[in-house]
C-alpha cells in the first residue's frame, strides 16, 4: 500500500515556463508534506514544506499547494530554470513525526 | 557543518560477502534514518533511530540486514551475507526534533552498493 504517490515519472518544460509536479496521498493523518530535490550522485535535499492546516506555502520561485479534501498537493516552480532539472520527491510525515513516507519521485527536465 | 557523511561512496562485493555501510549524522541531530533506493521500489525507509535507540525497523527486508547506532555520531548498516538483489543506493539521513515543525531530513550522498 503506497501512501504517497507521484503518478508522473517525468516532466519536461521549457525554461521560463511553469513546472507543476503533483503528489497524492491516502493517509489523512499526515501533518506535514515536504518536497525534496535530488541531483544525480547526491542525496535528496529539502526544498519546501507545508503544514496540513495551510493550503499554500511560498518560497521564492517555489510554491506548494495543498488540497486536503482531494488528498493532493502540488509543487509549482516559476519561472523554471535549467538548474531545476532534478528528481523531485514528495514526502509526508504524521503522528510518528520522526518518520517520513516518500513518493517514487518525478524527474523534471527544464530545456534551455 | 560537514553535513551527513557516508562511507564508502561505492562498494562492489561478491555474493555471500559481508558489507558494512557507515554513517556520521549531523552533530546534535537526534534522529537517524537508513534508506534504500532502487528503480523498482523507489526510496524505502529501512530503519530509524531516535537518541541512538532503534524505533522502527519494519522496513528491514530480512534478517541478513542489521543496523546499529553505538553513539550519537555513528551508525552502521550491515548486510551478511550479501546478495545481488541488495544492489542499490543506500542513504543515511538525520534530523533534529523541534528544529522545525516539518521534520525535514538531511541526507548524506549515499553509498552505491553493487553485489555481483
Image: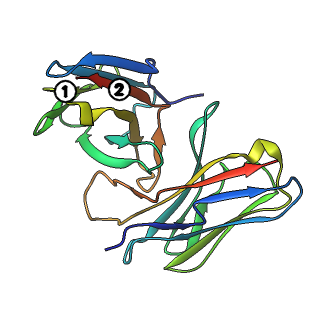
Image position of A108 with respect to B35: above or below? above
Image position of A34 with respect to B114: above or below? above
Looking at the rendered structure, the number of numbered marks drawn on it comes to: 2
Residue A17 image position (x, y, % from top left):
16, 18
Q: Quadrant of residue B106?
A: bottom left
Q: Is residue B36 left or right of residue A37?
A: right
Residue A29 image position (x, y, % from top left):
40, 37
Q: Nearer the viewer, residue B30 or A89?
A: A89
At x 29%, y 19%, the residue is: A69
Residue corresponding to mark 1:
A80
**Callout 2: helix, strand or loop?**
strand
Residue B103 image position (x, y, % from top left):
34, 55
Q: Is residue B45 left or right of residue A64?
A: right
Q: Nearer the viewer, residue B44 or B37?
A: B37
Q: Is residue A60 left or right of residue A19?
A: left
Q: Nearer the viewer, residue A53 or A90?
A: A90
Residue corresponding to mark 2:
A108
Q: Quadrant of residue B34?
A: bottom right
Marks 1 and 2 on same chain: yes
> Given the current orientation, which residue lies at the most extreme right position?
B16
The crowd level at tag 2 (other Cα within 10 Å; few <14, some 14-19, many 20+) is: many
At x 43%, y 18%, the residue is: A8
Residue B110 image position (x, y, % from top left):
53, 55
Q: Is residue A72 visible?
A: no
Q: Are marks 1 and 2 in contact (CB under 8 Å)?
A: yes
At x 13%, y 34%, the residue is: A61
> Given the current orientation, which residue lies at the most extreme left position?
A60
**Callout 1: helix, strand or loop?**
loop
Amino acid at each position: 500500500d503506497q501512501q504517497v504517490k507521484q503518478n508522473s515519472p517525468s516532466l519536461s518544460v521549457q525554461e521560463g515556463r511553469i513546472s507543476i509536479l503533483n503528489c497524492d496521498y491516502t493517509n489523512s493523518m499526515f501533518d506535514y508534506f515536504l518536497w525534496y530535490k535530488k541531483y544525480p550522485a547526491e542525496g535528496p535535499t529539502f526544498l519546501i514544506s507545508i503544514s496540513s492546516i495551510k493550503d499554500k506555502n511560498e518560497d521564492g520561485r517555489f510554491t506548494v499547494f495543498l488540497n486536503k479534501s482531494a488528498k493532493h498537493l502540488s509543487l509549482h516552480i516559476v519561472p523554471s530554470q535549467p538548474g531545476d532539472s532534478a528528481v523531485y520527491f514528495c514526502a509526508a510525515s504524521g503522528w510518528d513525526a520522526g518518520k517520513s513516507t516518500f513518493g517514487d519521485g518525478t524527474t523534471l527536465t527544464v530545456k534551455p | 557543518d560537514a553535513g551527513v557523511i557516508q562511507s564508502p561512496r561505492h562498494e562492489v562485493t561478491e555474493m555471500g560477502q559481508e558489507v558494512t555501510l557507515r554513517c556520521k549524522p549531523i552533530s546534535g541531530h537526534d534522529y537517524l534514518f537508513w534508506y534504500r533506493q532502487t528503480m523498482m521500489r523507489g526510496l524505502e525507509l529501512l530503519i530509524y533511530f531516535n537518541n541512538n535507540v532503534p524505533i522502527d525497523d519494519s522496513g528491514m527486508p530480512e534478517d541478513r540486514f542489521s543496523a546499529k547506532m553505538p553513539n550519537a555520531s555513528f551508525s552502521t548498516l550491515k548486510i551478511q551475507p550479501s546478495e545481488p538483489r541488495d544492489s542499490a543506493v543506500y542513504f543515511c539521513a538525520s534530523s533534529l526534533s523541534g528544529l522545525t515543525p516539518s521534520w525535514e531530513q538531511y541526507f548524506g550522498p549515499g553509498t552505491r552498493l553493487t553485489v555481483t
